Amino acid sequence: MECARAWDLLSAYLDGDLPEREREGIAEHLRHCARCAEEERALKETLSLLKNLPPGAAPPGLLAGVRLRIEKEQAAPPLWKKLFLPAHIKIPLEAAAVVLVFLLAYGIRKEMPASKVSPAPSASVERGTPGSRTDTRTDRQKAGAPVKRPPDAADRETGEKEAPREISSTMPGKKERAVVFAPRPGKPAGQAKAELPSVPAARVSTEGGAIGPTSLRDSPAGESTAPRVFAPPLSRLLRPMPSGREVTIEVASDDRTGLEDRIAVLALRLGGTVRREETGAAGGVGAEETFPLREIVRVHVPVDTAGAFLEELGKLGTIPPEGMTGKVEFHAGPSLDTVAYTVRIRVRHTPGSPSSPASR
Amino acid sequence: MDSAAPPPCSPKNRASEAGTRPVDLLVEAFREGKPGAFDAIVRAHQDRVYAFCTRMLSDREDAQDVAQEVFLSAYRNLTGFRGEASLSTWLLRIAANRCLNRIRQRTARAAREVLPDEPQGDGVAPFQPPGREEDRPDRMVETRETGKILEAAIARLDEDSRLLVLLSDVEGFTYEELAAAAGLPLGTVKSKLHRARMALRRMLAPVV
């Protein structure tokens, strides 16, 4: 055995941790190599010194210090105990957190556009007037996002207010609708601003059950009547709704004339009231005047006749699936026994009619 | 040399010095909530734990602080002590961990306290032996105070080597206990222990 190898094994040799053969090899080497034998002797003496190191004596205050630390620890529980105990604090806190998370998830879910939940194919515009500005509703808009009106600048240029018009798509197997914004014929210029009340559009989601009377849910046009729930956004839940619930009624252009009056008569017949004028600063700063609302009728009806009002309203035209806010459990009216409705009128242009974009 | 003779100080063959039976009784008494049981445990082991901490840390105040931490930790966890090793081995393992943590804290603190405009050489902090210059073993030859020389030599080992030498050759840990305490494989423990012993033997060359 070489010296280097013997040196490497010296510790194990002294510990008795070598197999018999290697142990004998080292012993043999040490008998003939004075240098390695001296090394082995010195290492053995070192280990002997270590083993016989005098035991230290702990300072007298060590035990007292330990006791003090234990007492301190028992007097002041650790932070995690302070946070999570006792149970009469912990359990209500956790319950409140669960409720909060549920409410947030509910609000976010309802705020989310339906297209993100269940994407549907885009509607295709069957026809449009060449050269006229058109705006095809995307799925998201159909799903309930506020419909973007044409910019005011365009209104100023043309002097006309554009009204959404709905046409059918030709997508096989699925009937879709698209809305075309086209200039309204015969509309006086300069009224566009006053005709855009800031009533938010309805929102729609694609799950849950339908609301309202059965007759309103069944679309006469044969459209998909998949059950849907129209729920308001969370912001609505937290704010009062001065305009009440929204209902959009869709009529053919031929039936448009006098529709506001028919809605008003209906409301009055059911014991309600009608408001068709709005007060606002229409003539400059501080100058207030009333101006008539166009395409919007605001009514207040007693709670017990609200269902009948909606049913009768459905007979005056068609309430499309996205045309009504959801069945919500909060009150939407000036008092607990009155429901406010904002009825929005939408004209459905039939092919060949004089006001149809295609016929112009 | 007689190859059949048993080696003088074999960690494999040596049993732990602390008697396990009385200590086990103390642990049982503590678990049963008998008053004074924990005090008895501290008294039985404080000298050994404190001496180990002093040799590891080369500072009496730190050693006392860490020794108290060790017994506080034991107080918290003694109910979970399964008796696989002797109580003294268990306590020394806690002490070894605490001492290494304390040394790392010191090193980190010392690194933070280095002024930025101080010359740093090649970026590596120069080796600072834990002992004082006058405590170097070769300077103490004349005094022949073997114990002091040995303590000083131990203090000059790096902390990992110091830990292995103290646990193995002073406290009598077996290789397996060493590996568990140091968190190293058995082979690594053996080779590191050998290197540490040889380093110590070189430092003690003037006296042995």
Image (cartoon, grey):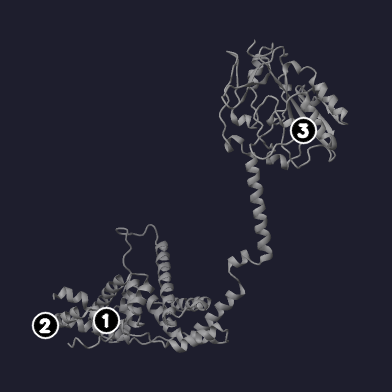
- Determine whether, in the image, residue B105 is placed left or right of residue A38: right
- Determine whether, in the image, residue A56 is placed left or right of residue A103: left
Amino acid at pointer 3: Ser
Count neighbours of disc 1 (C-alpha within 10 A) and say few if under 14, some if 14 to 19, many if 20 or more: many
Disc 3 to disc 1, how far (Cα)? 93 Å
Mark 2 and mark 1 residues within 8 Å of each other at the beta carbon? no
Instruction: Return the residue nearer the eye: A143 or A63.
Output: A143
Mark 1 falls on what kind of element?
helix
Residue A290 lies, in percent from the top left, at 81, 23
Count neighbours of disc 3 (C-alpha within 10 A) and say few if under 14, some if 14 to 19, many if 20 or more: many
Give the image quarter of residue A274.
Answer: top right
Residue A340 lies, in percent from the top left, at 80, 34
Query: Are callouts 3 and 1 both on one chain?
Result: yes
Which label sits on residue A15? Answer: 1
Which label sits on residue A32? Answer: 2
Residue A204 showing in the rendered view: yes
Disc on the earlier residue, 2 or 1: 1
- Determine whether, in the image, residue A101 is placed left or right of residue B14: right
Mark 2 chain = A
Disc on the earlier residue, 3 or 2: 2
Residue B207 lies, in percent from the top left, at 24, 84
Residue B131 showing in the rendered view: no
